[in-house]
Amino acid sequence: MDSRYFDRDTTKLKTTPFGIFTDQAGYFPAMSKKAVIPFECDSFEVTDINGKVCFSGKTTHFGMDEHSGDDVYIADLTDFCEKGSYRVNAGGKTSAVFTISDDVYSPVLHDTLKAFYFLRCGCELDERYAGVYKHGKCHTGKAVLWDDNSVAVDACGGWHDAGDYGRYVTAGACAAAHLLYAYKMFPRVFDRMDMDIPKGNAPDILTECRYELEWLMKMQSPDGGAYHKLTTKVHAPFIMPEDDREQLFVFLVSSMATADLAAVCALASGIYREYDGGFAEKLKNTAEKAMAWLGSRDEFIGFTNPHGCNTGGYGERDDLSNRYWAYGEMFALTGERIYEEQMKSLAERGFPLTGLGYSEMGGLGSLAHILCTFEKDTDFSHKLKDAFAHRAGYLRTLSDKCGYDVAMHIGEYCWGSNMNLLKNGMIFAIDEHLNGNDRASNAASQMHYLLGANALGISYVTGTGEFRCNYPHLRPSFADGIEECIPGMVAGGPNHIPGDPFAKEVIKPGTPPMKCYADDAASYSLNEITIYWNSPAVFLLGFLCDRYGDDGQESL
């Protein structure tokens, strides 16, 4: 394998050339703007790309930051709103270049959303849309049931889930739901957005989601349940997708996959009926069939990998939040009060009502009820709104305690920490959208961290920023032989409990949590990508573009 990733020569790991940390994409003019300086200094300057001083000020001493181990000083640039490209300078050190403009997040929103196109399975990626990242058709053969190899299943399509080539119903439903809610809540950002993908009869974000939804519906078993996943027996080596020709297997039905299938199809049905009534009806029928399966089975049917399979498991402790989400979306689609009553009953069972990840879906069910246009129990809806407000308030206390404004506690620097970061950013966005609480700067701070205002000074989105991750644990990115990674991929991020041999070698004991990261394809526990890490980034960027951007979205 290519030695740039897998020779285990830890002396070759990159460190930032910059001593001052900013959002490397930049800032909207009206947005709060801060640079983080991890060394003692009392003043700073902002210079343009020619070195001209455009703004200056005094720093504020935050103090010792537990997340990073840094003694942090803050340079507040909020009052500087002149459009252009700049660096922050202090103490003989500088930052990466950043931009101030009305469409500053347009490129990164485009890239993080188009990443889903690059992860399409079952089709070729045409050079017209994929450029140098084109590849041939992949995984087009018939799959067979794991427990009965004589039964073939047409399950071609969907998105590759992560660094591997597996496809998983719960993960796919979660990612699609984030994108669908981004469109539903911030439509003006996406209505005219050109993703440079094959066109459908709906906005591009919905065209891309439809590619996943068509696959999800194929994963419904004849009795209405949902097969949990579609993978080979073991993960493919680091080869191009069209070169992975091992037998595909469809694995056993799980109740959480069935509930998630019902939920995302019901959500999508209400959105797509404006564009394609036949497709919307097909989605509704799939949801109703899955709901009938759930209605006949109260027991939790989980999933663990059978002997001989080592691909992703996506197991869960229970299916309470999954069912709650399904009831919420069915109520929002049909207005049938029985679904609301089932929601209310489940809401007393103790799972988070604001959960937004694949293993805790309660927040999506709560959104469904809050945004439902049918007659409903307004007291219950207010309770759900209050849950988002309370969660956002708690997250703000965490952000205020961190020198980098990160709304996480130490334990959240785990596998996929950037997912935790972005889900928390979503909570801020949802609270402002639903309750009118001013959370935009808190939401923006999570994006600033992702794009470079962190203790390593690295942008965790490929293709964005002067110093950025470029070697994710992503098979096609490694196998294509192209030095520059496919743009728009969100890396997993720092993990204070290294989970693979390479990470255990390079992350030394005692390293502060925010610094437990290496940009290397050998490390799946630090640097993998997944669809449900990209999807909250799209949602959060959609909110910020809606909140701060101008009305014209042609530049997207």
Image: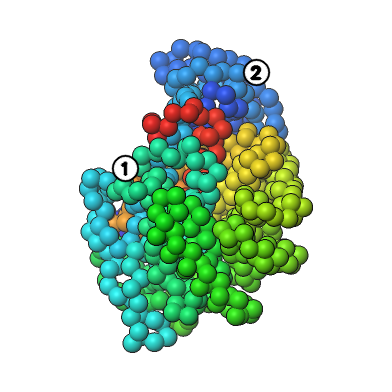
At 74% from the left edge and 51% from the top edge, which residue is drawn? 378
Quarter of the figure with the C terminus: top left
- Give the numbered dot on residue 196: 1
The numbered dot on residue 58 is 2
Mark 2 lies on a secondary structure that is: strand
Q: Earlier in the sequence, mark 1 or mark 2?
A: 2
| Residue type (three-letter) at the residue carrying disc 1 | Asp
Q: Residues within 10 Å of mark 2 (few under 14, many from 20)?
A: some
Q: Is residue 280 left or right of residue 477?
A: right
Work out whether 110 lies above or below 494: above
- Image quarter (top left, top right, bottom left or bottom right) of the N terminus: bottom left
Report x, y in % for residue 349: 74, 67
Residue closer to the observer: 236 or 137: 137
Q: Secondary structure at mark 1?
A: loop
Residue under the image location 53 percent in, 57 percent down: 267
Answer whether residue 171 is visible to the viewer in this image.
no
The part of the image, by quadrant, that contains residue 462 is: top left
Is 123 located above or below residue 539 in the figure?
A: below
Query: Where's residue 299, x and y in %?
Result: 63, 80
In this rendered view, identify the residue nearer to me: 171 or 401. Answer: 171
